[in-house]
Amino acid sequence: MTDDVLAELRALRAGDLPTHGGRTLAYVYDSALPGLDELAASAHALASSVNGLDPTAFPSLLRLENDVVRTAARLLGGGDGTVGTVTSGGTESCLLAVVAARDARPDVARPSMVLPETAHAAFHKAAHYFGVRAIAVPVDPETFRADPEAMAAAIDDSTVLVVASAPSYAHGVVDPVTEIAAAALERGVRCHVDACIGGWVLPHAPDVPPFDFSVPGVTSISVDLHKYAYCPKGTSVLLHASADLRRSQYFASAAWPGYTMLNSTTQSTRSGGPLAAAWAVLRHIGDDGYRSLARQALESTRVLREGIAKIDGLRVLGTPSATLLAVAAARDDFDVFTVADEMKARNWYVQPQFAHRSSPANLHLTVTAANAGHESELLADLRASVEAATEAGPVRVAPEVLAFVGGLAPDSLTPEEFAGLLAAAGMGGGDGVLPERMAAVNALLAAASPALRERLLVEFLGALYS
């Protein structure tokens, strides 16, 4: 019976994108180190039944968390007073940074946070959850870096937090943290650096301007362990420069007849499995190992970036400093969404990103250590994919479909309208089954306003989980 259950699970997993080998250039992170998965799985199993809700009941988790936080703080310029919390992922770390800033200022009736328009959507999620107004400031239209003068000008008496990215997810660009943090410090406002994807790589990258606790005014940093620390999903760390700054992150309630609830994260019960797995991986790889892995990923990114520049029709957006690339079309006779389909046909997954302000539609590549030494194969398939997309021509959405999309109102979308749009996109009766090629679907979504796209995807998600 046990074998049957596992065989069924393996059969289901066979339909997923590959998580190893460097062919899935989003969502997953592969160190290519042999034995690492087995180590993490064994450590996870040893602590999976342990509950992080109460560190006095399970002191092993207290030791593990302090060790992990100490490692992250040392890497990111922390001092003796730096403290932190292990969370379930980057989004939770960002949420907690926002709620800590909000709750530290109960005197502000309508709190706001200032962030570059390239900041991760997790901050907009935090704004939605916690009633903190998000003041999104335009970035440089060519470099996609935050404008520190514009950020400073947006700070007012309602501002409780200023955000910078190191780097931004969409373009891999590091914001000018020193100037942004200085502006926040001058106004007495917290400054959070979202280093979720770059925090374990940028310390080993050449010519990256300061972005960590060595910068005056930086009060908190988020860094994910399940990204370039190559730990299993999902573990992240939220660091605060001092315990005083962290205090408002905690939640306590004695307003019921049970135990007094005391939480350091949004979760109460927390499995010890992910924490133990992260601790084991960090100990196993060590400082020298991470330095080597980071340099491999950075060098692979450099090789890919230079190779992409030689492919007729492609260009890299901005000036990426880490291991992320945004690749756009340099001509109008093909569609990057078709390139994504062609790459998938060649067993690569690159993530489509829709146009937003000065950023055109592009393909996102997350490069890991597993890509080192295999750049020529990726570049050859990317070149062939562009040639195939050029031969196919740009995706054209029928005028009547565009008119239909233009007439939809996000706030009053009916089930019938949604079903009609699914049919127009080639997804049948709304059974959640995606077509093999997504270019037409992405072109249709690109034609929708951001608000309508959000609503359509919410409806689609609901159709998937039915």
Image (cartoon, rainbow, N blue to C red):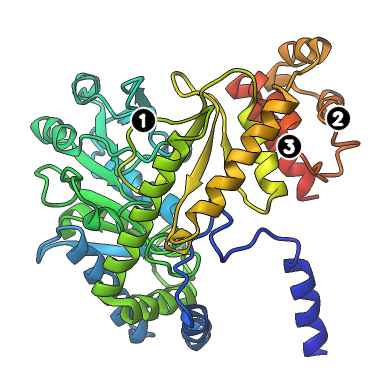
Q: Residue at x 47, y 49 (%)?
A: 366
Q: Residue at x 21, y 22 (%)?
A: 156
Amino acid at the residue labelled 2: Ala
Could you classify mark 1 by the number of other residues whose Cα lies within 10 Å: few (under 14), some (14-19), or many (20 or more)?
Answer: some
* Disc 3 to disc 1: CB gap under 8 Å: no
Tell me: 160 left or right of 343: left
- Rendered location of residue 278, percent (x, y): 40, 74
Residue 326 visible in rendering: yes
- Rendered location of residue 126, percent (x, y): 43, 41
- Identify the image quadrant of the N terminus: bottom right
- Does label 1 or label 2 sit earlier along the sequence? 1
Which residue is label 1 attached to? 318
- Rendered location of residue 263, percent (x, y): 38, 64
Foreground of the two, 283 or 368: 368
- Does label 3 or label 1 sit earlier along the sequence? 1
Which residue is label 2 attached to? 419
Q: Residue at x 49, y 81 (%)?
A: 44
Which residue is label 3 attached to? 438
Foreground of the two, 258 or 333: 333
- Whole-number angstrom distance, CA of label 2 to CA of label 3: 17 Å
Could you classify mark 2 by the number of other residues whose Cα lies within 10 Å: few (under 14), some (14-19), or many (20 or more)?
Answer: some
Foreground of the two, 229 or 261: 229
Identify the element where label 1 is drawn: loop
Q: Residue at x 90, y 36 (%)?
A: 428
Could you classify mark 3 by the number of other residues whose Cα lies within 10 Å: few (under 14), some (14-19), or many (20 or more)?
Answer: some
- Whole-number angstrom distance, CA of label 3 to CA of label 1: 26 Å
Residue 301 vs 457, above or below: the answer is below
- Whole-number angstrom distance, CA of label 1 to CA of label 2: 38 Å
Amino acid at the residue labelled 1: Gly
Residue 56 vs 305, above or below: the answer is below
Nearest to viewer (mark 1 / mark 2): 1
Nearest to viewer (mark 2 / mark 3): 3
